[in-house]
Image (cartoon, rainbow, N blue to C red):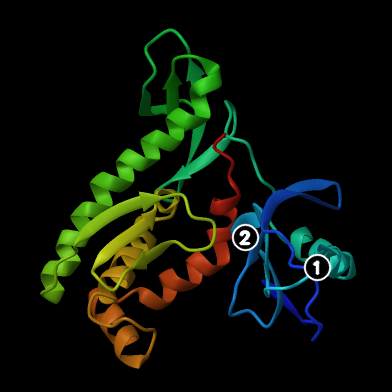
Amino acid sequence: MSFGFFRNPTKPKPAPVEEREHVVAGRSLPLKIVENDRARRLTLRIDSGGRGLRITVPPGLRRGEVEKFLHRHQGWLEQRLAKVPDRPQVRPGIKIPLRGVPHLVMHEPGKRGTVSVENSGAGPTLVVHGDRIHLPRRIADFLKREAKREIEALVVKHTGALGKRAKAIRFKDTSSRWGSCTSDGSLSFSWRIMMAPAPVINYLVAHEVAHLKEMNHGPDFWALCKELCPDTERCKAWLKRNGGALQAIVFE
C-alpha cells in the first residue's frame, strides 16, 4: 500500500531519519522515516499485517513537510488499516494455524520449556511448557525449527529438479515479503509461512528457487515456477488473500 506526494522544489533544511510511533484511529504504530537520495517524492507504506508504517523521503525535506504529509493522509491510513486483520496476541486459549490447520494453544507450566503437538479432546493442540511469559517466544522458536526442517528439504528437492544450488538458506520475520533470492544464490524465507497450508509452503520454496535461474517475474519465470509447482496459481492466490492475517499475529 502506498501513496505519493511530489516534493517541494525548494531545498529546505534536511529532515532527520528516525523511528517513532504514530497514532492512527487509536492504534499506536511504529513509524520509520527513511531518507533516500533517489527519492523524488514522499511515499507512505503500510507494512504487511498493519505492523507499522514507513515513509521514504527525498533528501533536503523539512520535518514539517513530513508531518503535513501524514496529516493529509490520515484518512487514507484509517481506511486502509480498517481493512487489515486484527493483530491477535499469541496466548493460551487462542488458535493459530500450523501448516494450515488451526491448533489450540495450551499452557502447561509443570514441565521444562518445550512445545509439543498433540491431539486432545479439543482437537489439534500446541502444548507449551515452562513459564507463561515465554510462551509466545517458544511458539515462534518452534515455528522456526519447523521451517528450517521442512523448507531446507524442499529447497533440496526443487534445486535438484532445477539443476541449481542455493548458496545459503536463511529464516527471518519479514513484514513485507515471504521470501527472497539474492543474485549470489542466497535464499531467505519468513518462518511464518509454516502457518500456511503445506501446498503454499511448497509454492513459496519453488518460487524462490525459480529465481536462481530467472531473477525476474517475467513469463519465463512463471513458466518455471509452474513447472516446479503446478499448483502455483491457486497457492499464489491463497497467500495474497490470507498472508496479511498470518503477518498480523503477534509473537511478543
* Three-letter code for the amino acid on which mark 1 is drawn: Arg
Q: Residue at x 19, y 54 (%)?
A: 153
Residue 50 screen position, x and y as percent: 67, 56
Asked whether the viewer can see residue 125, the reply is no
Q: Quadrant of residue 85?
A: bottom right
Local packing at callout 1 (Cα closer than 10 Å; few below 14, some 14-19, many 20+) is: some
Q: Which residue is mark 2?
A: 47
Q: In this image, 90 relative to 14: left or right?
A: left
Q: Quadrant of the C terminus?
A: top right
182 or 90: nearer the viewer: 182
Q: Which residue is mark 1?
A: 62
Q: Residue at x 34, y 74 (%)?
A: 231
Considering only vertical position in the picture, is 38 above or below 102? below
Q: How many marks?
A: 2
Label 1, label 2: how many angstroms apart (C-alpha)? 24 Å
Q: Earlier along the polypeptide chain: callout 1 or callout 2?
A: 2
Q: Residue at x 53, y 62 (%)?
A: 176
191 or 167: nearer the viewer: 167
- In the picture as drawn, the residue positioned furthest to the bottom comes out as 219
Asked whether the viewer can see residue 46, the reply is yes
Q: Quadrant of residue 222?
A: bottom left
Residue 103 screen position, x and y as percent: 48, 37
Q: Quadrant of the N terminus?
A: bottom right
